[in-house]
């Protein structure tokens, strides 16, 4: 069976401007929640006034990958991009450089490198700007639609580094990043490419983004205690915290990595994608018995050739909404008596919910957990406030847990009943 390995990773998140900084902040229990200042949510009738945002000290010029350009040229280039596209370029740059792909000039090699970079929403802020421009009867920017189309971030990554393999993007809500990883696996496994840059980015902290999710009562309204607003599995959780950022993995065939002499950080053992097919339920709700989640977990294990007893850690999708218990229910029914031994944590308690990019950032955190033999903990969760329906697994609470991780799962579920489970193992 062809092995798919991970030779690079990158991220920019509300708790760090690169992957390692984000993971360090995660272990330290930091969060990225602060008041929204670029618009006034109350004027839109929103009860939610905060989000998980990239640091206010973030300077695009210091982090943007076009280092060969002058500052003026970089500023001009950045103006052409939506915020989610900027995050995509930053995360991809870190991963590509880590994997040693930035200096490849050989056309045959470039033809074998592809990009699958997704988003749940696309350039929402840019779309809102274009709509406002139309309503005002003003002339549109020629870059207007290029800023909000979901596939353009993948295009920019491909064009800048001249990767001429398959170029794709998924727009599958909160499972988009995980779908990128799954399709990246498939592209390499079937021989379509040797290397895939797989990830996602999101920047939906906008008037429409906040107001529409607020109207669904999906967002936390803990405006007076934002530090504890995201609290997966707790009895009093009341909604997720909108986040922004981007992340990706460099997936590569084992043969290609060996031939290049690339450092291997972990192995992508398998994945599975399912749908809930949830007739009679809201399109935003998971199957009440977690059927889609269960089949995704079992399918990922089957494809990886692993047993459920091999699983040491699960980075859950749990968002701090009422549906958290459904994922735990699925885990308990799949793992049965072994469930209480499986370490579980929800990193959204620190980062917020990055929507389409959540599966990508959580896959990066899972890789770093394996590398560092450390499981991050779920902030704000204790035995005193845990929902009884979420008991029955080994929650990592109050501090990180040092342990060897041979196999970990990362779950991603999205509106529309789309589910993905990704299995990542330590490299042996």
Image (cartoon, rainbow, N blue to C red):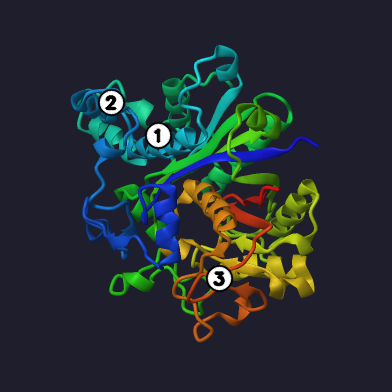
Name the residue rendered at 34%, 71% in the picture. 227
Residue matched to label 1? 89
Q: Is residue 62 above or below residue 76?
A: below
Q: Position of residue 126 (x, y in %)?
A: 31, 36
Q: Secondary structure at mark 2?
A: helix
Residue matched to label 3? 401
Residue matched to label 2? 77
Q: Secondary structure at mark 3?
A: strand
Q: Position of residue 111 (x, y in %)?
A: 58, 17
Name the residue rendered at 66%, 66% in the picture. 288
Among numbered discs 3 and 1, the one appearing first in the sequence: 1
Q: Position of residue 188 (x, y in %)?
A: 68, 30
On screen, residue 372 versus residue 155, left or right, reads: right
- Residue 352 seen in render: no
Quote the CA–CA distance across marks 3 and 1.
32 Å
Quote the CA–CA distance across marks 1 and 2.
12 Å
Q: Secondary structure at mark 1?
A: helix
Name the residue rendered at 51%, 21% in the picture. 163
Taking depth in this image into account, of 337 and 222 the one nearest to the observer is: 337
Q: Is residue 81 above or below residue 231?
A: above
């Amino acid at each position: 069976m062809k092995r798919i390995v991970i030779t690079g990773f990158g991220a920019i998140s509300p708790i760090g401007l690169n992957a390692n900084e984000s993971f360090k902040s995660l272990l330290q229990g930091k969060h990225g929640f602060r008041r929204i200042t670029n618009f006034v949510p109350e004027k839109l009738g929103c009860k939610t006034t905060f989000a998980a945002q990239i640091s206010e000290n973030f300077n695009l010029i210091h982090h943007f990958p076009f280092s060969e350009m002058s500052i003026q040229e970089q500023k001009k280039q950045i103006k052409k991009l939506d915020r989610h596209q900027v995050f995509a370029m930053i995360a991809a740059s870190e991963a590509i450089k880590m994997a040693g792909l930035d200096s490849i000039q050989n056309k045959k090699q470039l033809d074998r490198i592809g990009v699958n970079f997704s988003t749940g929403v696309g350039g929402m802020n840019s779309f809102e700007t274009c709509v406002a421009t139309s309503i005002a009867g003003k002339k549109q920017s020629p870059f207007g639609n290029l800023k909000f189309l979901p596939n353009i971030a993948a295009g920019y990554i491909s064009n800048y580094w001249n990767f001429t393999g398959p170029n794709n993007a998924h727009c599958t809500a909160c499972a988009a990043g995980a779908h990128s990883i799954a399709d990246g696996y498939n592209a390499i496994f079937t021989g379509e490419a040797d290397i895939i840059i797989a990830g996602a980015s999101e920047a939906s902290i906008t008037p429409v983004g906040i107001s529409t999710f607020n109207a669904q009562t999906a967002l936390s309204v803990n405006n007076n205690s934002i530090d504890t607003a995201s609290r997966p599995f707790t009895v009093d959780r009341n909604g997720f915290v909108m986040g922004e950022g981007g992340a990706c993995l460099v997936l590569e065939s084992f043969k290609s990595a060996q031939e290049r002499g690339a450092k291997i950080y972990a192995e992508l053992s398998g994945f599975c994608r399912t749908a809930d097919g949830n007739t009679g339920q809201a399109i935003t709700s998971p199957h009440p018995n977690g059927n889609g989640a269960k089949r995704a977990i079992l399918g990922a294990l089957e494809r990886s050739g692993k047993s459920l007893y091999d699983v040491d850690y699960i980075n859950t999708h749990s968002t701090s909404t009422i549906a958290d218990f459904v994922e735990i229910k699925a885990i308990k029914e799949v793992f049965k008596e072994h469930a209480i031994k499986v370490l579980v944590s929800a990193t959204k308690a620190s980062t917020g919910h990055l929507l389409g990019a959540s599966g990508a950032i959580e896959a990066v955190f899972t890789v770093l957990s394996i590398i560092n033999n450390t499981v991050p903990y779920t902030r704000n969760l204790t035995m005193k406030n845990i929902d009884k329906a979420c008991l029955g697994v080994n929650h990592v609470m109050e501090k990180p847990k040092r342990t060897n991780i041979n196999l970990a799962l990362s779950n991603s579920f999205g509106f529309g009943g789309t589910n993905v489970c990704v299995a990542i193992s330590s490299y042996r």
